[in-house]
Protein backbone atom coordinates (compact mmCIF):
# COMPACT_ATOMS: atom_id res chain seq x y z
CA UNK A 1 0.00 0.00 0.00
CA UNK A 2 1.55 3.29 -1.02
CA UNK A 3 2.67 5.74 1.58
CA UNK A 4 0.56 8.51 0.13
CA UNK A 5 -2.60 6.58 0.78
CA UNK A 6 -1.67 6.06 4.35
CA UNK A 7 -0.88 9.72 4.82
CA UNK A 8 -4.21 10.54 3.36
CA UNK A 9 -5.80 8.33 5.92
CA UNK A 10 -3.84 9.95 8.63
CA UNK A 11 -4.76 13.48 7.66
CA UNK A 12 -8.40 12.56 7.51
CA UNK A 13 -8.11 11.15 10.98
CA UNK A 14 -8.82 7.63 9.78
CA UNK A 15 -5.92 5.30 10.24
CA UNK A 16 -6.90 2.14 8.56
CA UNK A 17 -6.16 -1.51 8.67
CA UNK A 18 -3.70 -1.14 5.86
CA UNK A 19 -1.38 0.87 8.01
CA UNK A 20 -1.78 -1.55 10.88
CA UNK A 21 -1.04 -4.58 8.82
CA UNK A 22 2.42 -3.27 8.11
CA UNK A 23 3.51 -2.25 11.57
CA UNK A 24 7.20 -2.28 10.76
CA UNK A 25 6.58 0.24 8.07
CA UNK A 26 4.39 2.70 9.89
CA UNK A 27 4.87 6.30 8.90
CA UNK A 28 5.18 8.83 11.63
CA UNK A 29 1.88 10.60 11.49
CA UNK A 30 0.43 13.58 13.24
CA UNK A 31 -2.63 11.64 14.39
CA UNK A 32 -2.14 9.38 17.37
CA UNK A 33 -2.66 5.77 16.39
CA UNK A 34 -5.69 3.95 17.64
CA UNK A 35 -3.44 1.43 19.33
CA UNK A 36 -1.87 4.17 21.38
CA UNK A 37 -5.25 5.75 22.11
CA UNK A 38 -6.51 2.39 23.33
CA UNK A 39 -3.54 2.08 25.65
CA UNK A 40 -4.47 5.43 27.16
CA UNK A 41 -8.13 4.47 27.38
CA UNK A 42 -7.04 1.44 29.38
CA UNK A 43 -5.58 3.88 31.89
CA UNK A 44 -8.94 5.62 32.23
CA UNK A 45 -8.05 8.53 29.94
CA UNK A 46 -11.37 10.01 28.84
CA UNK A 47 -9.79 12.45 26.39
CA UNK A 48 -8.20 9.51 24.59
CA UNK A 49 -11.53 7.73 24.63
CA UNK A 50 -13.17 10.79 23.15
CA UNK A 51 -10.59 10.91 20.35
CA UNK A 52 -10.93 7.21 19.69
CA UNK A 53 -14.69 7.60 19.55
CA UNK A 54 -14.43 10.43 17.05
CA UNK A 55 -12.13 8.36 14.86
CA UNK A 56 -14.09 5.14 14.91
CA UNK A 57 -17.74 5.76 15.80
CA UNK A 58 -18.90 6.40 12.20
CA UNK A 59 -17.25 3.12 11.21
CA UNK A 60 -18.79 1.24 14.08
CA UNK A 61 -22.26 2.67 13.54
CA UNK A 62 -22.01 2.14 9.77
CA UNK A 63 -21.13 -1.52 10.20
CA UNK A 64 -23.77 -2.18 12.84
CA UNK A 65 -26.41 -0.39 10.82
CA UNK A 66 -25.49 -2.45 7.78
CA UNK A 67 -26.19 -5.61 9.74
CA UNK A 68 -29.13 -4.51 11.87
CA UNK A 69 -30.86 -2.14 9.43
CA UNK A 70 -32.83 -0.60 12.29
CA UNK A 71 -31.27 2.72 13.15
CA UNK A 72 -32.38 3.03 16.76
CA UNK A 73 -31.09 -0.44 17.60
CA UNK A 74 -27.89 0.31 15.77
CA UNK A 75 -27.26 3.31 17.97
CA UNK A 76 -27.95 1.24 21.07
CA UNK A 77 -25.49 -1.41 20.01
CA UNK A 78 -22.93 1.26 19.12
CA UNK A 79 -23.26 2.55 22.66
CA UNK A 80 -22.70 -0.95 24.02
CA UNK A 81 -19.63 -1.35 21.86
CA UNK A 82 -18.03 1.85 23.07
CA UNK A 83 -18.76 1.06 26.68
CA UNK A 84 -17.18 -2.34 26.13
CA UNK A 85 -14.16 -0.63 24.59
CA UNK A 86 -13.92 1.54 27.68
CA UNK A 87 -14.24 -1.48 29.96
CA UNK A 88 -11.96 -3.88 28.22
CA UNK A 89 -9.34 -1.63 26.61
CA UNK A 90 -6.80 -3.20 28.97
CA UNK A 91 -7.45 -6.57 27.36
CA UNK A 92 -6.53 -5.42 23.89
CA UNK A 93 -3.32 -7.12 22.82
CA UNK A 94 -1.50 -5.13 20.13
CA UNK A 95 0.56 -8.15 19.12
CA UNK A 96 -2.61 -9.97 18.14
CA UNK A 97 -3.92 -7.42 15.69
CA UNK A 98 -4.72 -3.81 14.99
CA UNK A 99 -6.99 -1.71 17.14
CA UNK A 100 -9.39 -1.07 14.29
CA UNK A 101 -9.79 -4.78 13.70
CA UNK A 102 -10.35 -5.30 17.41
CA UNK A 103 -13.04 -2.64 17.52
CA UNK A 104 -14.80 -3.67 14.33
CA UNK A 105 -14.74 -7.34 15.31
CA UNK A 106 -16.38 -6.43 18.59
CA UNK A 107 -18.94 -4.27 16.79
CA UNK A 108 -19.78 -7.00 14.31
CA UNK A 109 -20.14 -9.62 17.00
CA UNK A 110 -22.45 -7.42 19.04
CA UNK A 111 -24.54 -6.66 15.99
CA UNK A 112 -25.03 -10.31 15.16
CA UNK A 113 -25.63 -11.21 18.79
CA UNK A 114 -28.36 -8.58 18.84
CA UNK A 115 -29.89 -9.92 15.66
CA UNK A 116 -29.92 -13.44 16.99
CA UNK A 117 -31.32 -12.37 20.34
CA UNK A 118 -34.24 -10.60 18.67
CA UNK A 119 -34.82 -12.39 15.45
CA UNK A 120 -38.55 -11.89 15.58
CA UNK A 121 -38.14 -8.15 15.47
CA UNK A 122 -36.43 -8.41 12.15
CA UNK A 123 -38.43 -10.38 9.72
CA UNK A 124 -35.74 -12.66 8.47
CA UNK A 125 -38.19 -14.85 6.64
CA UNK A 126 -38.81 -11.95 4.32
CA UNK A 127 -35.27 -12.14 3.16
CA UNK A 128 -35.75 -14.91 0.71
CA UNK A 129 -33.50 -13.74 -2.05
CA UNK A 130 -29.83 -13.16 -1.74
CA UNK A 131 -28.81 -9.59 -2.08
CA UNK A 132 -25.88 -8.84 -4.25
CA UNK A 133 -22.91 -7.44 -2.49
CA UNK A 134 -23.78 -3.80 -2.14
CA UNK A 135 -22.59 -1.83 0.82
CA UNK A 136 -24.72 1.05 -0.37
CA UNK A 137 -21.96 3.52 -1.04
CA UNK A 138 -24.06 5.44 -3.49
CA UNK A 139 -26.35 6.51 -0.70
CA UNK A 140 -23.69 8.51 1.01
CA UNK A 141 -21.23 11.13 0.09
CA UNK A 142 -18.37 8.86 0.96
CA UNK A 143 -14.79 9.89 1.30
CA UNK A 144 -12.07 8.81 -1.05
CA UNK A 145 -10.95 6.43 1.63
CA UNK A 146 -14.26 4.61 1.74
CA UNK A 147 -14.35 4.44 -2.01
CA UNK A 148 -10.91 2.87 -2.01
CA UNK A 149 -11.86 0.29 0.59
CA UNK A 150 -15.08 -0.42 -1.18
CA UNK A 151 -13.41 -0.83 -4.54
CA UNK A 152 -10.84 -3.07 -2.94
CA UNK A 153 -13.52 -5.33 -1.52
CA UNK A 154 -15.61 -5.22 -4.67
CA UNK A 155 -12.70 -6.29 -6.82
CA UNK A 156 -11.77 -9.06 -4.45
CA UNK A 157 -15.38 -10.22 -4.29
CA UNK A 158 -15.38 -10.62 -8.05
CA UNK A 159 -12.74 -13.30 -7.70
CA UNK A 160 -15.04 -15.51 -5.65
CA UNK A 161 -17.39 -18.12 -6.94
CA UNK A 162 -21.05 -17.19 -6.82
CA UNK A 163 -21.64 -19.52 -3.90
CA UNK A 164 -18.67 -18.20 -1.94
CA UNK A 165 -19.75 -14.62 -2.52
CA UNK A 166 -23.34 -15.27 -1.52
CA UNK A 167 -22.38 -17.24 1.55
CA UNK A 168 -19.93 -14.59 2.77
CA UNK A 169 -22.37 -11.76 2.10
CA UNK A 170 -25.20 -13.52 3.94
CA UNK A 171 -23.00 -14.39 6.87
CA UNK A 172 -21.12 -11.15 7.32
CA UNK A 173 -23.44 -8.40 6.17
CA UNK A 174 -26.73 -10.07 7.01
CA UNK A 175 -25.64 -11.82 10.17
CA UNK A 176 -26.89 -15.28 9.26
CA UNK A 177 -25.36 -18.35 10.88
CA UNK A 178 -23.84 -20.98 8.66
CA UNK A 179 -26.86 -23.21 9.17
CA UNK A 180 -29.19 -20.38 8.10
CA UNK A 181 -26.99 -19.78 5.09
CA UNK A 182 -27.23 -23.47 4.36
CA UNK A 183 -31.04 -23.27 4.37
CA UNK A 184 -31.17 -20.13 2.26
CA UNK A 185 -28.75 -21.39 -0.35
CA UNK A 186 -29.97 -24.99 -0.28
CA UNK A 187 -26.53 -26.45 0.26
CA UNK A 188 -25.30 -28.68 3.09
CA UNK A 189 -23.84 -27.04 6.18
CA UNK A 190 -20.45 -28.61 5.60
CA UNK A 191 -20.38 -27.13 2.14
CA UNK A 192 -21.26 -23.69 3.49
CA UNK A 193 -18.42 -23.86 5.98
CA UNK A 194 -16.01 -24.91 3.30
CA UNK A 195 -17.19 -22.12 1.00
CA UNK A 196 -16.90 -19.56 3.78
CA UNK A 197 -13.37 -20.69 4.50
CA UNK A 198 -12.21 -20.96 0.91
CA UNK A 199 -13.87 -17.68 0.06
CA UNK A 200 -12.30 -15.84 2.97
CA UNK A 201 -8.88 -17.22 2.14
CA UNK A 202 -9.33 -16.06 -1.42
CA UNK A 203 -10.44 -12.61 -0.25
CA UNK A 204 -7.50 -12.42 2.12
CA UNK A 205 -5.08 -13.18 -0.67
CA UNK A 206 -6.83 -10.96 -3.19
CA UNK A 207 -6.81 -7.99 -0.83
CA UNK A 208 -3.27 -8.62 0.30
CA UNK A 209 -4.24 -8.83 3.95
CA UNK A 210 -1.30 -9.88 6.05
CA UNK A 211 -1.50 -10.45 9.73
CA UNK B 1 -23.47 -30.71 17.04
CA UNK B 2 -21.18 -32.61 19.30
CA UNK B 3 -17.57 -31.97 19.85
CA UNK B 4 -16.66 -35.05 17.89
CA UNK B 5 -18.56 -33.84 14.86
CA UNK B 6 -17.24 -30.32 15.11
CA UNK B 7 -14.78 -29.66 12.36
CA UNK B 8 -12.64 -26.80 13.62
CA UNK B 9 -10.23 -26.74 10.71
CA UNK B 10 -13.10 -26.13 8.32
CA UNK B 11 -14.71 -23.50 10.54
CA UNK B 12 -12.13 -20.72 10.43
CA UNK B 13 -13.99 -18.74 7.78
CA UNK B 14 -17.33 -19.10 9.50
CA UNK B 15 -15.75 -18.06 12.77
CA UNK B 16 -14.10 -14.97 11.32
CA UNK B 17 -17.39 -13.97 9.72
CA UNK B 18 -19.34 -14.46 12.93
CA UNK B 19 -21.37 -17.23 11.30
CA UNK B 20 -20.97 -19.84 14.03
CA UNK B 21 -23.74 -20.30 16.55
CA UNK B 22 -22.84 -19.36 20.11
CA UNK B 23 -22.35 -23.03 20.90
CA UNK B 24 -20.13 -23.71 17.91
CA UNK B 25 -18.20 -20.53 18.59
CA UNK B 26 -17.40 -21.92 21.99
CA UNK B 27 -16.34 -25.28 20.62
CA UNK B 28 -14.21 -23.56 18.05
CA UNK B 29 -12.51 -21.33 20.57
CA UNK B 30 -11.66 -24.37 22.63
CA UNK B 31 -9.88 -25.78 19.61
CA UNK B 32 -8.32 -22.43 18.84
CA UNK B 33 -6.69 -22.25 22.22
CA UNK B 34 -4.80 -25.43 21.46
CA UNK B 35 -3.76 -24.88 17.87
CA UNK B 36 -1.15 -22.43 16.66
CA UNK B 37 -2.07 -23.32 13.10
CA UNK B 38 -5.72 -22.45 13.59
CA UNK B 39 -4.82 -19.22 15.32
CA UNK B 40 -2.61 -18.12 12.45
CA UNK B 41 -5.31 -18.76 9.89
CA UNK B 42 -7.99 -17.13 12.01
CA UNK B 43 -5.89 -14.00 12.51
CA UNK B 44 -5.65 -13.46 8.77
CA UNK B 45 -9.33 -14.14 8.21
CA UNK B 46 -10.39 -11.86 11.04
CA UNK B 47 -8.34 -9.09 9.46
CA UNK B 48 -10.01 -9.88 6.18
CA UNK B 49 -13.43 -9.62 7.79
CA UNK B 50 -12.37 -6.24 9.16
CA UNK B 51 -11.70 -5.07 5.62
CA UNK B 52 -15.21 -6.20 4.71
CA UNK B 53 -16.39 -4.11 7.65
CA UNK B 54 -14.43 -1.13 6.38
CA UNK B 55 -16.28 -1.29 3.10
CA UNK B 56 -19.59 -0.40 4.66
CA UNK B 57 -20.43 3.30 4.51
CA UNK B 58 -19.70 5.12 7.75
CA UNK B 59 -22.60 6.89 9.43
CA UNK B 60 -22.04 9.89 11.64
CA UNK B 61 -23.73 9.20 14.96
CA UNK B 62 -25.87 11.94 16.49
CA UNK B 63 -23.94 14.09 18.98
CA UNK B 64 -26.24 12.90 21.77
CA UNK B 65 -24.88 9.37 21.44
CA UNK B 66 -21.39 10.51 22.31
CA UNK B 67 -22.52 12.64 25.22
CA UNK B 68 -24.58 9.71 26.56
CA UNK B 69 -21.60 7.42 26.34
CA UNK B 70 -19.19 9.91 27.88
CA UNK B 71 -21.64 10.46 30.75
CA UNK B 72 -21.69 6.72 31.45
CA UNK B 73 -17.94 6.26 31.74
CA UNK B 74 -17.79 7.15 35.41
CA UNK B 75 -20.26 4.43 36.28
CA UNK B 76 -18.63 1.88 33.98
CA UNK B 77 -15.82 0.03 35.72
CA UNK B 78 -12.75 -0.78 33.69
CA UNK B 79 -11.20 -4.21 33.72
CA UNK B 80 -7.78 -4.39 35.33
CA UNK B 81 -4.81 -4.68 33.02
CA UNK B 82 -4.10 -8.23 34.05
CA UNK B 83 -6.63 -10.79 35.10
CA UNK B 84 -6.19 -11.32 38.81
CA UNK B 85 -3.64 -13.98 39.56
CA UNK B 86 -4.78 -16.96 41.46
CA UNK B 87 -3.15 -15.82 44.61
CA UNK B 88 -5.40 -18.01 46.64
CA UNK B 89 -5.21 -21.03 44.46
CA UNK B 90 -6.41 -23.38 47.04
CA UNK B 91 -9.17 -21.72 48.87
CA UNK B 92 -9.86 -23.89 51.80
CA UNK B 93 -13.00 -23.92 53.70
CA UNK B 94 -11.24 -22.69 56.78
CA UNK B 95 -11.12 -19.18 55.40
CA UNK B 96 -14.84 -18.98 55.87
CA UNK B 97 -14.73 -20.08 59.45
CA UNK B 98 -11.93 -17.96 60.82
CA UNK B 99 -12.12 -15.10 63.26
CA UNK B 100 -14.75 -12.38 63.30
CA UNK B 101 -17.33 -14.50 61.61
CA UNK B 102 -20.44 -12.99 60.19
CA UNK B 103 -23.67 -14.86 60.24
CA UNK B 104 -22.90 -16.05 56.75
CA UNK B 105 -19.44 -17.21 57.67
CA UNK B 106 -20.85 -19.28 60.43
CA UNK B 107 -23.44 -20.78 58.18
CA UNK B 108 -20.96 -21.64 55.52
CA UNK B 109 -18.45 -23.09 57.91
CA UNK B 110 -21.13 -25.34 59.24
CA UNK B 111 -20.89 -27.44 56.13
CA UNK B 112 -17.31 -26.77 55.28
CA UNK B 113 -16.31 -30.29 56.10
CA UNK B 114 -18.27 -31.80 53.29
CA UNK B 115 -16.21 -33.88 50.96
CA UNK B 116 -14.81 -31.78 48.15
CA UNK B 117 -14.95 -33.00 44.57
CA UNK B 118 -12.80 -32.17 41.59
CA UNK B 119 -14.10 -30.63 38.43
CA UNK B 120 -12.83 -30.12 34.94
CA UNK B 121 -11.64 -26.79 33.60
CA UNK B 122 -10.93 -24.02 36.01
CA UNK B 123 -12.63 -25.91 38.73
CA UNK B 124 -10.19 -28.76 38.40
CA UNK B 125 -7.64 -27.20 40.68
CA UNK B 126 -10.20 -26.21 43.18
CA UNK B 127 -11.92 -28.20 45.76
CA UNK B 128 -15.62 -27.89 46.01
CA UNK B 129 -18.18 -28.20 48.68
CA UNK B 130 -21.26 -30.01 47.68
CA UNK B 131 -24.50 -28.18 47.86
CA UNK B 132 -26.64 -28.64 50.84
CA UNK B 133 -29.95 -30.04 50.39
CA UNK B 134 -32.61 -28.16 52.23
CA UNK B 135 -32.19 -25.07 50.17
CA UNK B 136 -32.89 -26.44 46.77
CA UNK B 137 -35.82 -28.48 47.76
CA UNK B 138 -37.61 -25.37 46.62
CA UNK B 139 -35.45 -24.19 43.77
CA UNK B 140 -36.74 -22.57 40.61
CA UNK B 141 -36.94 -23.77 37.07
CA UNK B 142 -34.30 -21.87 35.19
CA UNK B 143 -32.62 -18.76 36.42
CA UNK B 144 -29.88 -17.10 34.56
CA UNK B 145 -27.50 -14.68 36.11
CA UNK B 146 -25.00 -12.72 34.22
CA UNK B 147 -22.53 -10.95 36.34
CA UNK B 148 -19.07 -9.68 36.70
CA UNK B 149 -17.22 -6.66 35.58
CA UNK B 150 -19.76 -5.94 32.91
CA UNK B 151 -22.54 -5.79 35.42
CA UNK B 152 -23.10 -2.88 37.71
CA UNK B 153 -23.23 0.39 35.91
CA UNK B 154 -23.08 -0.89 32.41
CA UNK B 155 -25.72 -3.55 32.49
CA UNK B 156 -27.88 -1.59 34.79
CA UNK B 157 -27.84 1.35 32.46
CA UNK B 158 -28.32 -0.31 29.17
CA UNK B 159 -31.11 -2.70 29.89
CA UNK B 160 -32.02 -6.27 29.50
CA UNK B 161 -30.87 -6.89 25.95
CA UNK B 162 -27.44 -6.40 27.31
CA UNK B 163 -27.75 -9.56 29.35
CA UNK B 164 -28.21 -11.88 26.45
CA UNK B 165 -25.30 -10.14 24.80
CA UNK B 166 -23.27 -10.71 27.92
CA UNK B 167 -24.24 -14.32 28.13
CA UNK B 168 -23.27 -14.83 24.52
CA UNK B 169 -19.99 -13.04 25.08
CA UNK B 170 -19.33 -15.11 28.14
CA UNK B 171 -19.98 -18.34 26.29
CA UNK B 172 -17.70 -17.13 23.56
CA UNK B 173 -14.87 -16.27 25.93
CA UNK B 174 -11.73 -18.22 25.18
CA UNK B 175 -11.35 -19.28 28.78
CA UNK B 176 -14.97 -20.01 29.61
CA UNK B 177 -15.51 -22.77 32.12
CA UNK B 178 -18.62 -24.53 33.31
CA UNK B 179 -18.97 -26.08 36.70
CA UNK B 180 -22.02 -28.22 37.15
CA UNK B 181 -23.34 -28.79 40.62
CA UNK B 182 -26.09 -31.37 41.01
CA UNK B 183 -28.95 -30.18 43.13
CA UNK B 184 -30.76 -32.23 45.68
CA UNK B 185 -34.01 -31.59 43.88
CA UNK B 186 -32.65 -33.42 40.85
CA UNK B 187 -31.77 -30.43 38.72
CA UNK B 188 -28.42 -28.77 38.29
CA UNK B 189 -26.82 -25.42 38.88
CA UNK B 190 -24.15 -24.51 36.36
CA UNK B 191 -21.72 -21.73 36.96
CA UNK B 192 -20.41 -20.40 33.67
CA UNK B 193 -17.47 -18.08 34.17
CA UNK B 194 -14.63 -16.38 32.40
CA UNK B 195 -11.61 -15.10 34.22
CA UNK B 196 -10.64 -13.07 31.19
CA UNK B 197 -13.99 -11.28 30.95
CA UNK B 198 -14.37 -11.08 34.70
CA UNK B 199 -17.88 -12.32 34.16
CA UNK B 200 -20.00 -15.23 35.26
CA UNK B 201 -23.44 -16.66 34.81
CA UNK B 202 -25.43 -19.19 36.72
CA UNK B 203 -27.93 -21.42 35.03
CA UNK B 204 -30.37 -23.43 37.08
CA UNK B 205 -32.07 -26.29 35.36
CA UNK B 206 -35.09 -28.24 36.52
CA UNK B 207 -34.73 -27.12 40.05
CA UNK B 208 -38.30 -26.72 41.29
CA UNK B 209 -40.19 -23.61 42.37
CA UNK B 210 -39.76 -20.75 44.78
CA UNK B 211 -42.72 -19.35 46.63
CA UNK B 212 -43.97 -15.85 45.79
CA UNK B 213 -42.17 -14.23 48.68
CA UNK B 214 -38.80 -15.84 48.02
CA UNK B 215 -35.98 -14.89 45.72
CA UNK B 216 -32.59 -16.29 44.93
CA UNK B 217 -29.64 -14.27 46.03
CA UNK B 218 -26.09 -14.78 44.85
CA UNK B 219 -23.05 -14.05 46.98
CA UNK B 220 -19.36 -13.63 46.50
CA UNK B 221 -17.26 -15.04 49.30
CA UNK B 222 -13.79 -13.65 49.58
CA UNK B 223 -11.33 -12.67 52.26
CA UNK B 224 -13.83 -13.79 54.83
CA UNK B 225 -16.31 -11.30 53.49
CA UNK B 226 -19.67 -12.00 51.97
CA UNK B 227 -20.87 -9.62 49.29
CA UNK B 228 -24.23 -9.74 47.62
CA UNK B 229 -23.93 -10.43 43.92
CA UNK B 230 -27.55 -9.75 43.14
CA UNK B 231 -31.04 -11.09 43.36
CA UNK B 232 -33.16 -12.96 40.91
CA UNK B 233 -36.87 -13.45 41.17
CA UNK B 234 -37.70 -16.17 38.70
CA UNK B 235 -40.91 -15.41 36.88
CA UNK B 236 -40.72 -17.92 34.10
CA UNK B 237 -38.69 -20.72 32.65
CA UNK B 238 -35.92 -18.31 31.67
CA UNK B 239 -35.41 -15.56 34.14
CA UNK B 240 -32.41 -13.33 33.71
CA UNK B 241 -30.85 -11.29 36.45
CA UNK B 242 -27.67 -9.31 36.57
CA UNK B 243 -25.12 -9.81 39.27
CA UNK B 244 -23.46 -6.84 40.83
CA UNK B 245 -19.73 -6.49 41.08
CA UNK B 246 -16.89 -8.18 39.26
CA UNK B 247 -16.45 -11.91 39.06
CA UNK B 248 -13.12 -13.03 40.34
CA UNK B 249 -12.11 -16.66 39.98
CA UNK B 250 -10.64 -16.56 43.43
CA UNK B 251 -13.96 -15.73 44.96
CA UNK B 252 -16.31 -18.45 45.90
CA UNK B 253 -19.83 -18.07 44.58
CA UNK B 254 -22.75 -19.13 46.69
CA UNK B 255 -26.50 -18.97 46.40
CA UNK B 256 -29.23 -18.78 48.98
CA UNK B 257 -32.97 -18.43 49.06
CA UNK B 258 -33.90 -15.15 50.71
CA UNK B 259 -37.10 -13.27 51.47
CA UNK B 260 -38.38 -11.13 48.60
CA UNK B 261 -36.16 -8.09 48.20
CA UNK B 262 -33.08 -9.93 49.32
CA UNK B 263 -31.02 -9.71 52.47
CA UNK B 264 -28.00 -7.79 53.66
CA UNK B 265 -26.32 -11.03 54.60
CA UNK B 266 -27.35 -14.54 53.70
CA UNK B 267 -30.01 -16.00 55.93
CA UNK B 268 -30.75 -19.12 53.92
CA UNK B 269 -28.35 -22.02 53.72
CA UNK B 270 -25.74 -21.26 51.09
CA UNK B 271 -24.98 -23.64 48.28
CA UNK B 272 -21.46 -23.20 47.03
CA UNK B 273 -21.32 -23.24 43.27
CA UNK B 274 -17.69 -22.41 42.70
CA UNK B 275 -14.52 -22.05 44.67
CA UNK B 276 -13.76 -22.72 48.30
Image (cartoon, coloured by chain):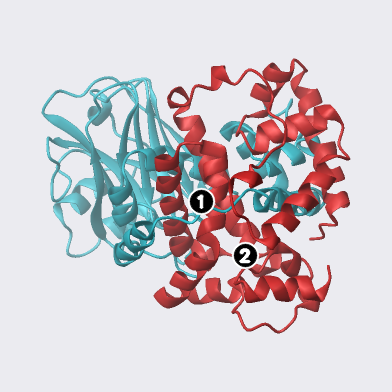
Q: Colour of chain B?
A: cyan
Residue B218: quadrant of the picture = top left
Expressed as whole percent of the image width and height from the top left, the position of residue B197 reads 48, 54
Circle 2 crowding by C-alpha within 10 Å: few under 14, some 14–19, many from 20: many
Give above or below for A183 relative to B234.
above
Q: Would residue B88 be visible to someone looking at this image?
A: no
Residue B139: quadrant of the picture = top left
Expressed as whole percent of the image width and height from the top left, the position of residue A175 reads 60, 34
Q: Chain of mark 2?
A: A
Expressed as whole percent of the image width and height from the top left, the position of residue B267 reads 14, 42
Q: Is residue B196 left or right of residue A129?
A: left
Residue at the spot x=57%, y=34% of the render?
B22
**Location of mark 1 (residue):** A61
Residue A95: quadrant of the picture = bottom right
Q: Earlier in the sequence, mark 2 or mark 1?
A: 1
Q: Chain of mark 1?
A: A
Residue at the spot x=39%, y=53% of the render?
B150
Instruction: Assign a secondary structure to mark 1.
Output: helix
| Residue sitting nearer the eye, A132 or A117 | A132
Circle 1 crowding by C-alpha within 10 Å: few under 14, some 14–19, many from 20: many
Q: Colour of chain A?
A: red
**Location of mark 2 (residue):** A99
Give the total of numbered labels.
Answer: 2
Q: Would residue A164 be visible to someone looking at this image?
A: yes
Q: Is residue B128 left or right of residue B110?
A: right
The residues bearing labels 2 and 1 have C-alpha atoms spaced at a distance of: 16 Å
Residue at the spot x=58%, y=50% of the render?
A140
Instruction: Assign a secondary structure to mark 2.
Output: helix
Give above or below for A51 relative to A102.
below
Expressed as whole percent of the image width and height from the top left, the position of residue A47 reads 42, 77
Q: Which numbered tag is attached to residue B11?
A: none
Amino acid sequence: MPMSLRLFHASSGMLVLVAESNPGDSPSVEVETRESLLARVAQGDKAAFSDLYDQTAPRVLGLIRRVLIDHAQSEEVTQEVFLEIWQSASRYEPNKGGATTWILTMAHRRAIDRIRASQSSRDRDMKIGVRDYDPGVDDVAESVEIRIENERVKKAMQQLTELQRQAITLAFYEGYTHSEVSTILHVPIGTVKTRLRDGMIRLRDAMGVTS
Amino acid sequence: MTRDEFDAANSTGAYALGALSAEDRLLFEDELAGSEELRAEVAGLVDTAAVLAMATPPIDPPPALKSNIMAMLDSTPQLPAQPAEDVLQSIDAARFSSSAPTAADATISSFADHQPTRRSGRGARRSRIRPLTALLASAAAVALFVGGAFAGGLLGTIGSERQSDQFAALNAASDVTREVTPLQSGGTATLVSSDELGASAIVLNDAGDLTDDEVYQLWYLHDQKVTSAGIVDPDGPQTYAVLDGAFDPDYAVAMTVEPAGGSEQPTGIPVLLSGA
